[in-house]
Image (cartoon, rainbow, N blue to C red):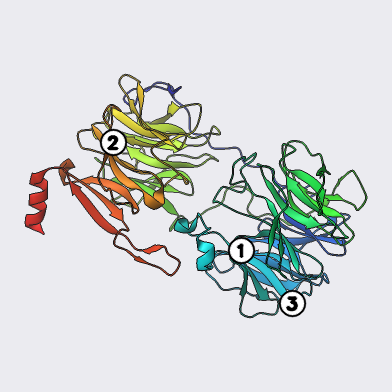
Amino acid sequence: MSIRIHGLILSLGFVVGLSHGAPLPPPDPERPLWLRTPAVSPDGSRIAFAHGGQIWVVPTAGGEASALTSGPFYSHHPVWSPDGQRIAFASRRHGNDDVFVMPAAGGAITRLTFHSAADVPQSFSPDGREILFTSARLGSPQADALDVAKPLGGLQQLYAVPATGGRPTMLLPTPALDVAPSADGQRLLYTDRRSFENEWRKHHVSEAARDVWLFDRGDGSHRRLTRFRGEDRNAVWSPQEDAVLWLSERSGSFNVWRQPLAGGEARQITFHQGQPVRFLSSARDGSLVYGQAGEIWRLPAGATQPQRVPVHIRQGNLMAGPTTVQLAGQATEFAVSPTAPELAVVARGEVFVVSAQTGQARRITNTPAEERHLSFAPDGRALLYASERSGRWEVMAARLTRAQDTGFAGVAPFEEKLLVTGPGDVFQPLLSPDGSKLAYRQDRVTVRVLDLKTGQSVEVLGRDAVYSYTDDDLRYAWSPDGRWLVTRTGFEASAEVELVDAAGRQPRRNLSNSGFTDKWPQVGAGGQAVLWASDRAASPAPDGNPIGMDVYATFLTLKAFEAFGASA
């Protein structure tokens, strides 16, 4: 294992000055970037797209774009009605994505969905009467057996809602994304989704990679159209509906491919290099529109060379430059100083220290990158956190430089330095109670312990012991003597709480041994008990997920158990 240690927590070593980040240049109104989810109108004359959280429309030939929405609410994924008179889109006007519809020429906006799950439109029905959308709702018991992500909240189903408003109905109980109906509405091209794998991950190759399917509403059959082990997605029909065009990574980055519906050899249509092609849509004449490298491209029917659509956005931007932001309600984690009346807080990806006496906050980091995972040194004079400023996660340390200072919340000077880095991501630092050891995660799937005096790092929890799907689903805590860590092992939905030797020599000891979800372990009773949360006694919700969790404890000594029983 290649781990580079930059100085020690109790010495200064290499010091990195606080980065303030150069201000971003103002957007070029003649060539704006980050034009997302473009959708060409059925007649091929206009393109709707998302930019800056709003929905815009521009002629297919390019030119001045017109905003259809306004306000601070994020809107995205526009889709056209078959007659080109209406546009449906998703917006977070009420907190989460709902489906809205409005005239394509601008005008009154109507809300169509009211569920607490994210509702994202996919297409109008061919007759324009319904809008098809995805949403992770209750689903069906039969489909739940195929939903590997059900314990984590479940995957989306496909629904239809009347375009004039009304009760949604479920069309498919299994995930169907990027839906493209045939002209008669009897067949649906769609992209499957088999896992929670990040959809923006590039060059994904596994059994969970997405494929293009064809659903026949008449006989209820599903036909798999692509079998590349990487990503295939976002299919559209050819004008005669005898072929499909879709985005595939079989060419390296996503490009447009074409294949006859009856079978045959797949043929690459576009040849963009570097950045992937995204958001494929088609007009009735067969012209294609898609996004690539933050801009909109068009491939006219019968053409072989795509053309960049020149989009001009002359909207002023009051968000350029420094802004004052209210951080109330935006704190994501905190750590209490062991010595001073202050606590460290992460808000909007930056580290602050707040005085518990005055409420005054002091900013510790100021970078364009995210910081998180706070850990104070036992003497309170150093604060550790993870930072992604270099392009990968590393452990940083901010340390007071004057002997007379005891806390960060005032004006005491401090220096920041890089403490631990590696060939992959290194984050979630946690100092031992005496400050001599540092536990951290390496590449998300292993836990290591670093001896800060010797610089030696040892793996205490390997990739065979734990499965992590999100960065914060694995927690650990130190025993008071620094000899043990308590953590969870296995997959979160059926995790166990185990005792792990901080030296990496002794085998792990399962403390929960239940088969249910056991997580969030902490050490209590002066190191004589381990507490954690478990759903083993929880009642199930209608979707099968448990409602609530209870606190359990394993007592490591008879004395602690008897003392607990006497006080109960």
The local crowd at label 3, few if under 14, some if 14 to 19, many if 20 or more residues have their Cα within 10 Å, is some
Side of 484 relative to 183 (left or right):
left
Residue 118: x and y in percent read 57, 64
Residue 424: x and y in percent read 50, 30
Closest to the camera, between mark 3 and mark 1, is 3
Closest to the camera, between mark 3 and mark 2, is 2
Side of 433 relative to 247 (left or right):
left
Of the two numbered discs 3 and 2 on the same chain, state the one appearing first in sequence.
3
Judging by the rendered image, the residue that carries numbered circle 2 is 508
The local crowd at label 2, few if under 14, some if 14 to 19, many if 20 or more residues have their Cα within 10 Å, is some
Toward the viewer: 551 or 275?
A: 551
The N terminus, quarter of image: top left
Residue at the image position 16 percent from the left and 43 percent from the top: 556
Contact, CB < 8 Å: mark 3 with mark 2?
no
Toward the viewer: 113 or 545?
A: 545
Q: Which mark is residue 12?
A: none
- Residue at the extreme top: 454
Judging by the rendered image, the residue that carries numbered circle 3 is 129
Of the two numbered discs 3 and 1 on the same chain, state the one appearing first in sequence.
1
